[in-house]
Amino acid sequence: MKLNIIAIIIGLICLIVGLALGYGLGASRVEEEKVAPEERSENITALLNIEKSSLLDDITAQFRGEVVEIEENSLLIKEGADSLRGEIGDFAPSVAKIRLTEDGKKELVDQEFKFQDVKIGDKVIVNCILREGHWQIIGVTIEEISPH
């Protein structure tokens, strides 16, 4: 009788441990699969493949949107439902302006611009570098439609 009770207790312990391990593995798999692989862009897949590499120092990215807020040390752009706040780091970002002509060509406006020349409502391309979890702006290109 004692042997049966010990066998039942050991069986229940194994069952509980097995369920706990199975649940833990299932929960971690759900986290990895929040974004289905077929929905990921090739760029996201490449980033995920290198994210733990010792070679990775910084990530540089380019964002396009409309300026909706400007603060002394940051810029908020929005495109549809997506938005991004970029911060100004230790150095002022480079600023340029391109003019989109009626025939679809781009012309560089030959003039010096400063961050203060960026205005709310401007369509911009923002070049950022990801440092310590924050997007730091390194360059802004203002897109202007030719008035001709």
Image (spheres, helix red, strand yellow):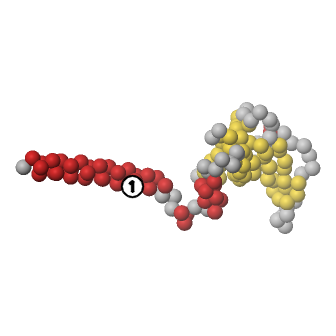
Residue 111 seen in this snapshot: yes
* Number of numbered discs on residues: 1
Q: Quadrant of residue 70?
A: top right
Q: Residue at x 88, y 54 (%)?
A: 108
Give the left or right position of residue 58, taking residue 13 as reference: right
Q: Secondary structure at mark 1?
A: helix
Q: Residue at x 35, y 51 (%)?
A: 21
The 10 Å Cα crowd at callout 1, few under 14, some 14 to 19, many 20 or more, is few
Q: Which residue is mark 1?
A: 26
Residue nearest the observer in this picture, 56 or 3: 3
The x and y percentages for residue 125 are 75, 51
Give the left or right position of residue 67, taking residue 101 as reference: left
Q: Residue furthest left?
A: 1
Residue 44 seen in this snapshot: no
Q: Residue at x 71, y 41 (%)?
A: 136
Residue nearest the observer in this picture, 129 or 82: 129
The x and y percentages for residue 25 are 40, 53
The x and y percentages for residue 40 are 58, 61
Q: Amino acid at mark 1?
A: Gly
Give the left or right position of residue 133, taking residue 113 as reference: left
- Quarter of the image containing the C terminus? bottom right
Q: Quadrant of residue 102?
A: bottom right
Residue nearest the observer in this picture, 42 or 140: 42
Residue nearest the observer in this picture, 73 or 51: 51
Q: Residue furthest front?
A: 3
The x and y percentages for residue 85 are 66, 42
